Amino acid sequence: MPVSAIPSPRPPIAIPNTAQEVLGEAEHDALCAEITALLRAEDAVLVAHYYTSPEIQALADATGGHVSDSLDMARFGHDHAASTLVVAGVRFMGETAKILNPEKRVLMPDLAAECSLDLGCPADEFSTFCDAHPDRTVVVYANTSAAVKARADWMVTSGSALDVVNHLKDRGEKILWAPDRYLGDYVQNETGADMLLWNGACVVHEEFKGEELHALRRAHPEARVLVHPESPRAVIEQADYVGSTSGLINEVRMARATEFIVATDRGIFHKMREAAPGKVLIEAPTAGRSATCQSCAACPWMAMNGLRKLRDALRDGRNTIEVPAAVAARARRPIARLLDFAAARRQEVYGNNDA
Ligand code: SF4
């Protein structure tokens, strides 16, 4: 059995106390009209992540934009003719969009919209960690800064991680994995690869509780349990399906079950309801006897993407994402490696994987 090791505990991440924007109907409608006009005037398209608010997702769809996972957001932005991409999500998504679309202007509603996985993996510390293990292939999750990707051999998404790691294991390679220790643990458990794990976590998925999930399943014995692999092992072990955001939505659409317990950010319910109207969606528990919940199934950084900030960014041309050319050139390599790998295997990476 391969051995994994985790570096010493990392300092806790400061979690912002962000609530989702609440608007009256009149302001909501006025903002949507103003943003729609600005998108046209600025030759811009809105791309949003599944975890943003229903209002942002609906506006992206209504204006010819796109709602998806981070890599597919970047792909859509690349294929779209617009010269400006407005990325509603978190910062690494804006960076990935910029890395893959260097000729385009990339704006975000709020540059302070971070991610605990990204924040928990500073590039300088990570680089030192890599230097200490030169015999290992460096594989990083999409939820990392451009500077961390620039230090990596491979980037993976949650939907491609098992295939890539199996491929590397078959080649006899040992892996240094960052930043999510839960996703890393899941991948190691599934593949048996020799993986050294960075000690990061998603503050949303980390809080799903195995004990309380047991109780919820007893109360809903017919429910199918869908789990994102950034969740702890005690939660993943109870899953009927483990997969990326796109995979989870597809599972709700395709499965015969009519009731689902879902362990991921509740923002995904908007697309799940669209995909399978009438099916019952139940949030996996973050509360209960073992609760330590701070974010409670809602990412505090995703919540920074309100319509007012989106309008301001577009109107004022502010919050532009810049990635230094040398960093972008290096960061593009592990991303391109994943895309080439997927293409060679005739896999559909885009729209079937996420961060
Ligand atoms: S839900 Fe977790 S992984 Fe996704 S952006 Fe928020 S903190 Fe990062």
Image: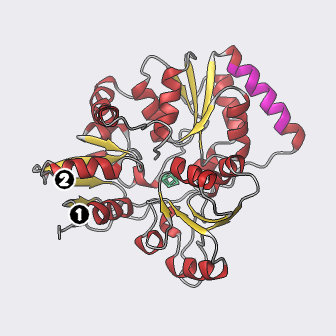
Q: Which disc is residue 236 wearing?
A: none
Question: What x and y, as percent, mark residue 28?
Answer: 82, 38
Distance from mark 1 CB to nearest ligand 1 atom below 8 Å: no
Q: Quadrant of the image for the N terminus?
A: bottom left
Taking 259 as reference, is 164 left or right? left
Left or right, 267 with respect to 138, comes to right
Name the residue type under label 1: Gly
Which residue is at the far bottom?
289
Classify 10 Å Cα crowding around label 2: few (below 14), some (14-19), many (20 and above): some
Q: Amino acid at mark 2?
A: Lys
Residue 216's x, y, as percent?
62, 78
The vertical placement of 59 against 174, above or below, is above
Give the image quarter of residue 316.
Answer: top right
Q: CB of mark 1 within 8 Å of CB of mark 2? A: yes
Residues in magenta? 28-39
User: What residue is shown at x 73% (from left), y 48% (from top)?
Assistant: 21
Instruction: Farthest residue to the front: give it.
Output: 256
State whether residue 332 is above or below residue 49: above
Q: Residue 196 at what x, y percent from top left?
A: 22, 60
User: Looking at the image, is mark 1 or mark 2 earlier in the sequence?
Assistant: 2
Residue behind mark 1:
192
Mark on residue 169?
2
Query: What secondary structure predominates along the stretch shown in magenta?
Result: helix
Query: Within 8 Å: ligand 1 and the Cβ of disc 2?
Result: no
* Label 1 – label 2 distance at C-alpha: 8 Å
Residue 128 visible at all: no
Quick one: SS at disc 2? helix
| Residue projecting furthest to the left | 135
SS under mark 1: loop
